Amino acid sequence: MPTNRSGSRSVIGRERSVWTTIAALLVLLALAPAHAAEPQTAVGSVDATGPGPLLDELPDERVEAGLLTIAPGPIYWQRFGHNAIVLRDRDNPERAVAVNYGIFDFSERGFLLNFLRGRMHYYAQAGDDPAGEIDGYRRAGRGIAVQWLDLAPRQVGLLRARLARDVSPRHARYRYDYFTRNCSTRVRDALDAAFEGALERSSRVRSRGWTYRQQSLRLARPDLPLALGIHFGLAGFTDRPLTLWEEAFVPQRLADAVADLRIGDRRAVARSERLSVHTLGLPDTQPPAWRWAFATTGLVLATLLWFLHGAGSRSTAARRAFALSRVLILLGCGLAGSGLLALWLTTDHIAAHRNLNLLVASPLCLLWLIAGGNRRTAPARIAAWAVGGVLVSLAFALWFAFTEAARQDFADWLLLVAPMLLVLARLERTRAQPRGSA
C-alpha cells in the first residue's frame, strides 16, 4: 500500500512513465522477471525513522489480526497481486493499522541501476489508514478479502513483536528478491511467527508440483509480451517443483495456505470477509501450454524464409524481404543472447543465471550478421566460424532440452528459433558465393 497519497499527479505520472520504460526493457531484453508481488511506489522519500503505530497502547487481547489479500490488477507490476497484515481494535474496528512490505523509494540514490542489477531494497512500513488504501483498490475494481485469524492473545503478542521488529529503523529496509524474499514471503514469515512455525510445518511437506516459472506465466499471461519476456528470461532455477511454502511468493497462494491451516482441532482462520468484488479479468487457473504454438510458428517462419530466398532470384521485393528478415532474426537473437549473458555475468538476478536460452539465441549471431555474406577471405572465415558456433550451440540445446541433463523449460524457444537459424545457416553458403554462381 502506498505510504503517501498526497503527491502531485505530475510526480505520479512521471514515475509511471519511468516504470513503463523499465517494463519495455524487461520484455524486449529479458532483463528480469516481473515483480512477484505488487510493489508500492513511495511518492516521497520512505520514512524509516520509527516503527509507526502498531496499537501499542492496547493489550493483546483487544487486538485482532488479519491477512489482507488484493487480487491482481491490469498493470504489469500488479499482475501478481498484493497483501498486507492488518491489526485492529476489537472494540473500535475503525482503529486499524496495515503493515506492508512492498514499499520502495524511487528517489533512493542508484535505485534504477540497482533495480536493473538485481540489488533492490524494499521497506516494511505500518500505515494507519488501511481503509483509505482499500477504498483505492476497490475503486480500481480489484477484489479484496481479509482473513481474520484465530489467534490467542499470546500469539497476537508474537505477531506484534515480529511486526515491530520488521518496521523498526534497523530492519525496515531489506534486500528484495523476486521469488524468495518479496512482499508476500515477508508477510508469510511474520504470520508463521504468530503461528509458532505451524504454517511452515504444514506447507513445507506439500506441493502441487508447480514451479516459479509456471506460477509467473499463469499470472502474467493476460499481458502476452510480458509473459513471453518472463518465459525467455527465466533460467533453470525457476523450474523445480515448489512446496506450498515457497508458492506463497504469490499473495493468493499465501491466502490459500492460511485458509487450509489447522492448528490442533481448529482452523487458523476464524472468519473471512469479502471487502470488494473483483470486476477485472481473473488470472488463468493453469499455466499456458505453448509448445505446439511455438513449434508451428517456427516451422512456418522457416518455410517462409526458404520461399523468400528462392523467390529472390525472380523478385526484387522477395530478395529485400529475405534480407530484412535475415537481419532482424540474427540481430534479435544476438541482442537477446547478449542480454542474457549480461544478466548472468553482471547482475544478481539469480533467476536468470545460467539461462540455457543462450544456446538458442547465441551472441554469435551478431558476429554472423556482421561478417556473413562478405566475399573477402577473413570476414568469410569469421562468418563460417560464427555459423558453426551457432550450430554447435543448437545441438547442445537440443540435447539439454529433451534429456534430463538440465532442468530448464526452454524447449519452446528452441522449437521457435532453431528452424529459422538452420535455414539461414543452410543458405549462408549461397550468400557468400559470387552472384551468378551455382
Image: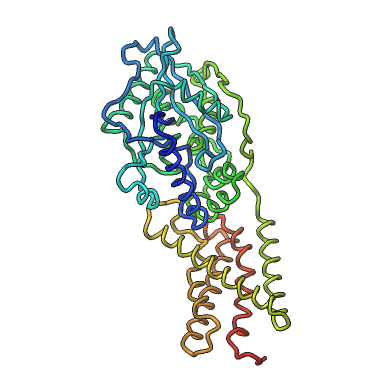
Location of the C terminus by quadrant is bottom right
Of 16 and 190, nearer the camera is 16
Visible in this render: residue 205?
no
Q: Residue at x 53, y 73 (%)?
A: 390
Q: Nearer the viewer, residue 243 or 30?
A: 30
Depicted 56 relative to depicted 349: above or below: above
Residue 143 in view here: yes
Q: Position of residue 249 (x, y in %)?
A: 48, 38
Closer to the camera, 226 or 90?
226
> Residue 87's quadrant in the figure?
top left
Q: Residue furthest top?
A: 91
Q: Residue 140 vs residue 56: left or right?
A: right
Identify the residue at image location x=37%, y=58%. 346
Q: Quadrant of residue 437?
A: bottom right
- Which residue is drawn at the image coordinates 41% and 58% (left, top)? 344
Pick the quarter of the image with the N terminus. Answer: top left
The answer to whether 12 appears left or right of 110 in the picture is right
